[in-house]
Image (spheres, rainbow, N blue to C red):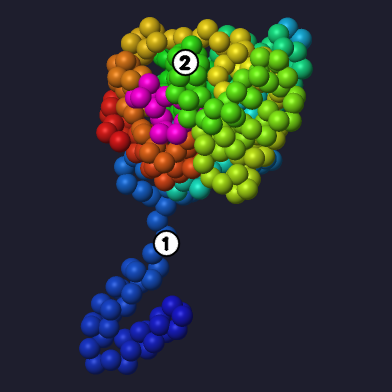
Amino acid sequence: MFACLFCILYSLIMKSTCPSLYLAIFIVFCSFGCKQPSTTTQAGEISLQQYFTPGEPGVQNGNVKMVTIETPKGPMKVWTKRIGNNPSIRLLTLNGGPGATHEYFECFESFLPAEGIEFIYYDQLGCGNSDNPDDTAYWSLPRYVEEVETVRKALDLNKENFYLLGHSWGGILALEYALKYQDNLKGLIISNMMCSCPDYGKYAQDVLAKQMDPKVLDTIRTIEANKDFENPKYFELLMPHFYAKHICRIPMEEWPEPMSRSFNKMNNSLYVTMQGPSEFGIAGNLVNWDRKAQLPSLTIPVLTIGAKYDTMDPAFMEWMSTQVQHGSHLYCPNGSHMDMWDDQQVYMTGLIKWLKETNSGAKKVSL
């Protein structure tokens, strides 16, 4: 089409008694018609081309990187995958469980790339695509903290770009990492995890348990007292009376496939060792974990995320944001423990706003 217009204008110029007029039109046409699509953006933003720049040279593998970690049994590998490229915002995700996989974070793909935010999937040792030593001696919080630090170094994350998001058990790991290595962080997000397992257990008993049908609760208590956790009746009762109300409030027959896929791959050895046999309180080796007294030592921007129907006390989650030096809080009024799914718009809008504003220099963000 542009070639035809070019010929017409050229013919008019040659035949016209006033060629200068048509020549001016011709120049304007060329300046617009020949202009190439812009790949530049406003200051601080990332172009589409920049965002999808490959992370490594050579044969491209979808930005998957296996990171080697040293263990008493020799080198093992953990799986990571980078989505996008933004040199100032690199968000490493820590999944919950313990023992689930990165897959329930796949909903982030529908929101963060459009905002130019780089994020990184990561399966912890024993989870998903990573090696599994099949040894309970590896299921310890201090070892996982050092694993995250190894991953950070391998992915070249630093205080100029490194945001860490931990959800549920991942929130414990993220906080514990920050308390030791906050000088490497640009910001910390603790999503749906109280900083005290004793307080979490108390909330489960004093608040959540009392919301249950007394007969259902009595049956659950009897099964737990007998340590009969393989009894089919146990999860038959927990699923509709607890999980459907406090884990994810989307109707169970409509639970998102990535979330179900992640849950179906749960490493039960890891889960039971650290959490205990049920989400209904903690009975594993994390039972006494408490970092309330250490919160004021955090000087980096911190975002806590809580939800009305969560297994975690939403008021406690908000309180945590007041104890760190630069805290913000996001409340999901319709969400539960998996609020990135069942209160998705609130969760994603708040997370994106906090990431962008702290990236621009804000210490606290009103959400």
285, above or below 322, in the image = above
For this orientation, the residue located farthest to the front is 215
Could you tell me which residue is drawn at 44 percent across and 38 percent down?
A: 335
Mark 1: few/some/many CA within 10 Å (<14, 14-19, 20+): few
**Disc 2 and disc 1 in contact, CB within 8 angstroms:** no
Q: Amino acid under label 2? A: Lys
Q: Tell me residue 166's x, y (percent).
A: 50, 25
Is 194 inside the magenta-drawn segment? no
Q: Quadrant of the C terminus?
A: top left
Which stretch appears magenta? 305-318
Q: Quadrant of residue 56?
A: top right
Q: Tell me residue 27's x, y (percent).
A: 30, 73
Query: Which structural element holds mark 1?
Result: loop
Is 315 inside the magenta-drawn segment? yes
Could you tell me which residue is drawn at 50 percent across and 16 percent down?
A: 201
62, above or below 173, in the image = below
Q: Which residue is mark 1?
A: 36
Could you tell me which residue is drawn at 59 percent across and 38 percent down?
A: 240
Q: Tell me residue 111's x, y (percent).
A: 46, 46
Query: Which structural element holds mark 2?
Result: helix
- Precedes in sequence: disc 2 or disc 1: 1
Inspect this view and state whether residue 81 appears. Answer: no
Q: Which residue is mark 2?
A: 202
183, above or below 155, in the image = above
Horizontal arrangement in the rendering, residue 221 relative to residue 13 (left or right): right
Q: Quadrant of residue 226?
A: top right
Q: Depth check: 353 or 113 in front?
A: 353
